[in-house]
Amino acid sequence: MTRLPYRLALDRMQTGDFLNWRGVGVIPELIMVFSKDSHSSLVVRMDDFFPHYPNDRVYLIEAIGDGMQLQRRNARVRFLREWERGARCFWYPCHMTDEQRQRCREYALYREALGDRYDLSVLLGYPLNFHPYGPNKWICSEWVIGAHISCGFYQNQLSCAPDPDDLPKLLEGRFDGPIELIGPADNDLEVRHV
């Protein structure tokens, strides 16, 4: 598996790419009883949408317990916070057209602005293998594939919400990777400030 310092990856990430996380803590570890990965995030670049923003404006839109959220801190801050807790992160660069990326970003920002909710029933249904798929209430991986459906990148119908592990299977042949992102202590390219 390819490993890449997160700073180099951030420069290359594009809207529509996704990250799968292997988190640390009670909820991620419960999820990983049923799924190898505990969470998925959709990458949204703001610098190519708003050209006057600094180049490091890579954000994540995620379905989390509070609902759909554009992470107000950029992806670098989110990655470092999770990495310091012991989480692992895997980047999947998707082969989208520019038009698909634009449509994916518009859809993601629109759904986030609507305040879509988190679908706790799907999370609670894991032990029963109950994963209904539907719009307006999401789990993390369902949100990522929903954004991909909205822009025409993924065109099949889903009968159930995918797990984070399912995304690479559903999108097989449409991405590079996975590429494990590594933090400052794992590479010589950065100095960690304490």
Image (spheres, grey):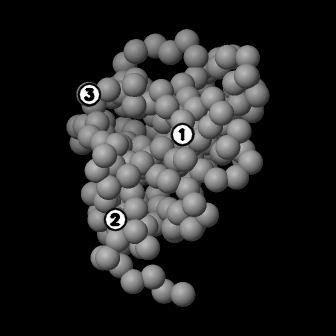
Vertical arrangement, residue 53 with respect to residue 68, above or below: below
Could you tell me residue 150's position as x and y percent?
43, 29
Could you tell me residue 118's position as x and y percent?
69, 37
- Disc 3 secondary structure class: loop
Q: Mark 1 packing: few (<14 Cα in 10 Å), some, or many (20+)?
A: many
Q: Which residue is mark 3?
A: 173
**Cα distance, mark 3 to mark 1?**
20 Å
Q: Which residue is mark 2?
A: 5
**Cα distance, mark 3 to mark 2?**
24 Å
Tell me which numbered mark, 3 or 1, is placed earlier along the sequence.
1
Q: Is residue 49 visible?
A: no
Q: Which residue is mark 1?
A: 37
Q: To which quarter of the image does residue 11 belong? A: bottom left
Residue at the location (74% across, 32% down)?
A: 120
- Disc 1 secondary structure class: loop
Q: Which mark is residue 1?
A: none
Vertical arrangement, residue 91 with respect to residue 191, above or below: above
